[in-house]
Image (cartoon, coloured by chain):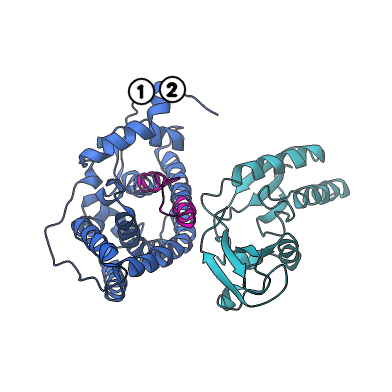
Amino acid sequence: MTTIHIEETPHLCAVLRLADTSLVLAHRLSEWCGHAPMLEEDLALANIALDLLGQARLLYQHAAELEGKGRTEDDFAYLRDAPQFRNYLIAELPRGDFAFTIVRQTLVSAFFHPFWQRAAGSRDATLAAIAAKAEKEVAYHLRHCGAWLVRLGDGTEESHRRTLAALDALWPYTGELFEVDAVGRAMIDAGVLPDPETIRPVFEATVDRLLREATLPKPPATWMHSGGLRGVHTEHLGHMLAVMQHLQRAYPGAVW
Amino acid sequence: MTRDSSERLERAIAAVSAVFDPEIPTVSIADLGMVRAVRMAADGAIEVDLTPTYSGCPATEPIAREVRAALEAAGVGPARVNWVLSPPWTTDWITEEGRKALRACGIAPPPRRAEANAPVPCPHCGSEDTEELAPFGSTPCKALWRCRSCREPFHRFKCL
């Protein structure tokens, strides 16, 4: 089994974190294809997945350029093991029920919309260009998922209960979005990535507004999970990669 | 520029302009605003700058293939296709011709971004009594709508 080894500069690592988050979340969303509660949502989740997959491809192509070893986007996606993935943990959690998927997508979009807005001013011109496209796509995801969050929270007793359970389960994974380690600090100082602290007020305002409309209580400040950015993942990522990478692992170099 | 090379460039522009979107075969990629430039590069090659619509649109690759094939068929000599992300594509770049072609195949064209909340006339009967069924559709660029007057469903190009 081929596994590639990447020598990660801070810049490469930062781009891989974004690429991996988009890819892993795209895969989780794509698992709904053919299983969503209604046809329109099947299309919606598949379309959101497609946007994220497109963003991941652009980010991996950029990572390949930064690394300069002639690798392709597929090498990064298919030939690395779980500890080499740099995604936020929130992206890899199993898709759960529809409420869980909607709450996760809302929280992630509420963070990434202002994130990409600011990253569009990055000193890394390629990243800035990717961000400017992603920002517009994520704004649409946030609008759609936010509307569902309100509908589910302020819906039936069961939809409220499930949405609240999802929110309580997911909230402890939001802290990682604001984590700044040495890589993050270097990228902020170099003007490559925005400081997540500048995103926090926007994220909080969006979440507070949606939760209020959804009649959901905001989870109390709590202990936050951490690890994805340095490759320490939940047990779920390995299982997901086993499915996602199966074909390339079983038939190396297969194309269609 | 010599007469020969300006004639080559003109043929290249004509060839690229005649490539249609594989998902919406009545609209050319030029009318969709995807062709950002066609120029003669310093090395004499024809260079085409394309911009993708949505980051993940699966039509992106077939379009690049068709542009290369069109240039080859037009016999313009060496040619290159570049994907340019910045500035990001917006539906405001869809031409009037493109909007007409969208309507003709039953797709409501997007409003200008400045008027994103304007009424959406039905592409079949023209009524403005329409409603959104779902904000996503069969391709990344479209949403599902229906007309309350003629009762027909239709696709609407999302405003981006």
- The percent position of residue A168, horizontal first and vertical second, equals 19, 60
What secondary structure prevails in the magenta region?
helix
Residue sitting at x 44%, y 34%? A74
Helix, strand or loop at label 1? It is loop
Q: Magenta segment, which residues?
A: A24-48
- Say left or right for A241 vs B68: left
Mark 1–mark 2 CB contact (< 8 Å): yes
> B139 or B131: which is nearer to us?
B131
Real-space Cα separation, disc 1 to disc 2, in angstroms: 8 Å
Q: Which amino acid type corresponds to the residue marked 2 in the rendered image?
A: Pro
Q: Is residue B6 left or right of residue A121?
A: right
Visible residue check, residue B93: yes
Q: Inspect the image, locate mark 1, and give the three-letter code of the amino acid beneath it.
A: Thr
Give the x, y percent position of residue A232.
20, 41
Relative to A251, residue A238 above or below: below
Is A46 within the magenta? yes
At x 40%, y 61%, the residue is A116
Q: Label 1: which residue? A: A2
